[in-house]
Amino acid sequence: MTAQSCPGDLIRFAEGLADASGAEARRHFRNPSLTVEAKADLSPVTNADRGIELALRKMVAAAQPAHGFFGEEFPAEKPDAEFVWVVDPIDGTKAFIAGKPTFGTLIALLQHGRPILGIIDHPALSERWIGATGHPTLHNGRTVHSRRCAELGNAVLYASSVEMFKGADRDRFESLRSQVRVNGWGGDCYSYGLLASGFIDLVVEAGLGPYDYLALIPVIEGAGGRITDWQGQPLELATGAKGRVLAAGDPGLHAQAIRRLTAQP
């Protein structure tokens, strides 16, 4: 097997991981027994975040013992393995805590450090995007495509929160935002699924970790879009640049956005 194609058995296994994570998330969602704590960086974490990640770690260890695992809540296991699973158990924990259904689980599979499989799963909405090298992106089993948008002036742009842009990043983001037709906030990983399905043109964010963006790459690229850091460089497990992410449905629009984000403020 090569990194250019993801086999069906791994895709099916990943869907099994998403099924398990979705069941656990629904069990905790809008449940008064949900517990919330603050991590060292003061971001919230729940018993659902930890329970999902532990459950998926056990499934991978049992079925794919040679594979590594990189998650948000616990230390990495076998990070140098040929295949490494990268998981964000609850992307959008604040939304999850607030009872908003746009939270999701992100599941990526890397081969030699490159993502060959990604799932964006929204259990409360019964929506799932699957991207895999050598396969078109699927939304609930149907092929989807990002839309063509040749001009920033016609673009719909989303970001999860204005608070993620600090200092010069805020100035660069505002330079781009000032050129688009529609700008909206919120959505977390849901926005990237909507971009793959042709409803959003740009998603721009900063301060993300690898578990936040690696699963997005096969989904967006398999739908015809492009996703990189703000310099146009590939996003990888060890990507620096403060976790700056730019996704576009139209590769030409992506190039225009890069020029805005790299211009001196």
Image (spheres, helix red, strand yellow):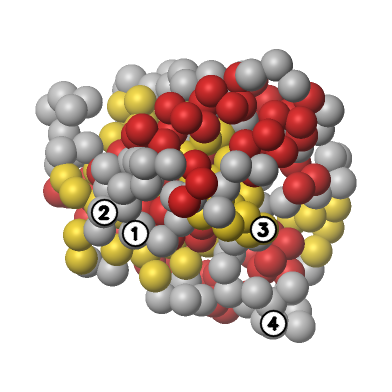
Residue at image location 79% in from the left, 55% down from the top: 44
Residue 76: mark = none
CB atoms of marks 3 and 2 within 8 Å: no
In percent of width and height, residue 173 lies at 68, 36
Residue 17 appears in view: no
Q: Determine which residue is flagged by label 1.
A: 197
Callout 3–callout 1 Cβ contact below 8 Å: no
Circle 3: is it few (<14), some (14-19), or many (20+) Cα within 10 Å? few
Q: Residues within 10 Å of mark 1 (few under 14, many from 20)?
A: many
Residue beneath disc 3: 185
User: Could you tell which of marks 3 and 1 lies nearer the N-terminus?
Assistant: 3
Look at the numbered discs 1 and 2 and tell me whether their residues touch, using CB distance below 8 Å. Answer: yes
Q: Which mark is residue 145?
A: 2
Q: Amino acid at mark 4?
A: Asn
- Please name whichever residue, 57 or 233, is drawn nearer the observer in this view of the structure: 233
149 over 198 or under it: above or below = above
Left or right of 1, for residue 233: right
**Location of the N terminus (image quadrant):** top left
Write down the quadrant of residue 72 in the picture.
top right
Q: Residue at x 15, y 38 (%)?
A: 134
- Amino acid type at circle 3 is Trp
Q: Position of residue 117 (x, y in %)?
A: 31, 41
- Across and down, in percent, residue 33 comes to 75, 79
Q: Under tag 1, what secondary structure?
A: loop
Q: CA distance from mark 3 to mark 4?
A: 26 Å
In the picture of the structure, the residue carrying the numbered disc 4 is: 31
Q: Give the CA distance from mark 3 to mark 2.
A: 23 Å
In this rendering, the answer to whether 246 lies above or below 124 is: above
Whole-Å distance between the Cαs marked 1 and 2? Answer: 5 Å
Q: Are marks 4 and 1 in contact (CB under 8 Å)?
A: no
